[in-house]
Amino acid sequence: MAVFTALESEVRSYCRGWPVAFDTAVGSRMTDIDGHSYLDFFAGAGALNYGHNNPALKGALLDYLARDGVVHSLDMHTSAKAEFLKTFDELVLKPRGLNYKVQFPGPTGTNAVESALKLARKVTGKHAMINFTNAFHGMTLGSLSVTGNSMKRGGAGIPLVHATPMPYDNYFDGKVPDFLWFERVLEDAGSSLNEPAAVIVETVQGEGGINPARAEWLRGLADLCHRHEILLIVDDVQMGCGRTGPFFSFELAGIQPDIVCISKSISGYGLPMALTLIKPELDVWSPGEHNGTFRGHNPAFVTATAALRTYWADDQLERGTGAKGQRVESALRHLAGTLPGDLEVKGRGLARGLGFAQPAMAEQVASSAFERGLLLETAGPESEVAKIMPALTITDQELTEGLDIFADAVRSVVLGGATA
Ligand SMILES: *Cc1c(COP(=O)(O)O)cnc(C)c1O
């Protein structure tokens, strides 16, 4: 471990909770250099929805590399990009009646968010954004300006401006009608609200604590945006690509956002890749106005295409995610029902969490789970939620095993005796 503490910046974070060195990974298991095996309920923070080194994707990637397929090409035309675009249109957009132009904004989630904010400002000529309490949209300045977490915001070192936060669904525990404040300040000439270009929202807040918005809340938001001519951006970076069941997390609500940000699991293999999906009439970019060296990472296009063909030609994965999500939910409800204290069961699909009234307990659960061979992270403004995000391809047996370990870890922390 000495090499990491000596040479790697203090900014490192995940590795602090899992102080081993990982070496190989297959499916839902990671193995460290000493041969210890860990079950993965973390899934690359949502970047590994199809598991580690998925053989269908690996085969396509190895074939592509073996035949000297182009790896780097900025945004030149390549066969790998053409195949991806055709497949994405045929298997994802068309069957859902969606019509979007595809922008490759640079290979990370925050790139997709930055380009969405820029484009919304260019289209509307307005600068102000509306974001939501506990939102997470990435680490670059524009994305941070619409992110809630005060510690992350503090890292900017400059004022983060041009965004106004509104209460996310259930922020007032159902005691305040949806959008009461938002509608009021929009309509009141004395409110001092700057006219917003766009609203940016997650349908389920991942980093913010696994908070799902209700379908009717999302429909209400889409309707409000429509009535006030505000663009609607859905950040589906973490909850897209099937995490909640359907390919896009907003399908449940039946809404069609103006702009959609996709990243994390779109390459399917953990290779960096991001998309900004744009309603055609909003595609007013000038050539090169949002640029980037790594917008044509062809190996990611190859694995993305293989992932779509393997998992999105029918609804088997989606139904499996629904069923597995239900199993996680009932296990969590059972656990919460048999333990003292206020444990909150949260989430949708295979984005699940257990919230603790005493925030420190969630971190203790994560480290206790790690000692038992299970990887999971925490979420929420005070890291008060133990987050359960297995690969969508996890087997039923592995899911049972992980849920048993999780239950043991929670019991040991809640009932005492756990050291963390
Ligand atoms: C992870 C995440 C981002 C940022 O993605 P990066 O690839 O880390 O830049 C943005 N939005 C959401 C909802 C995310 O979960």
Image (cartoon, helix red, strand yellow):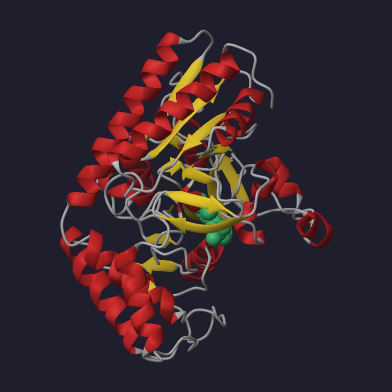
Give how far across and how far down residue 186 sits, in percent.
49, 42
- Up-down: is 115 above or below 10? below
At horizontal 34% and vertical 27% (from top left) the residue drawn is 329
At horizontal 38% and vertical 91% (from top left) the residue drawn is 77
- Residue sitting nearer the eye, 393 or 220: 393
- Residue sitting nearer the eye, 381 or 307: 307
Give how far across and how far down residue 99 sits, in percent.
25, 67
In the figure, is residue 364 to the left or right of 176?
right
Residue lying furthest front in this view?
35
Give how far across and how far down residue 268 sits, in percent.
38, 63
- Up-down: is 116 above or below 84? above
Q: Is residue 77 visible?
A: yes
Give how far across and how far down residue 240 sits, in percent.
37, 53
Q: Can residue 195 be seen in this view?
A: no
- Up-down: is 126 above or below 149? below
Q: In which quarter of the image is residue 314?
A: bottom left
User: What is the tally of numbered marks visible in this picture?
Assistant: 0
Q: Quadrant of residue 362?
A: top right
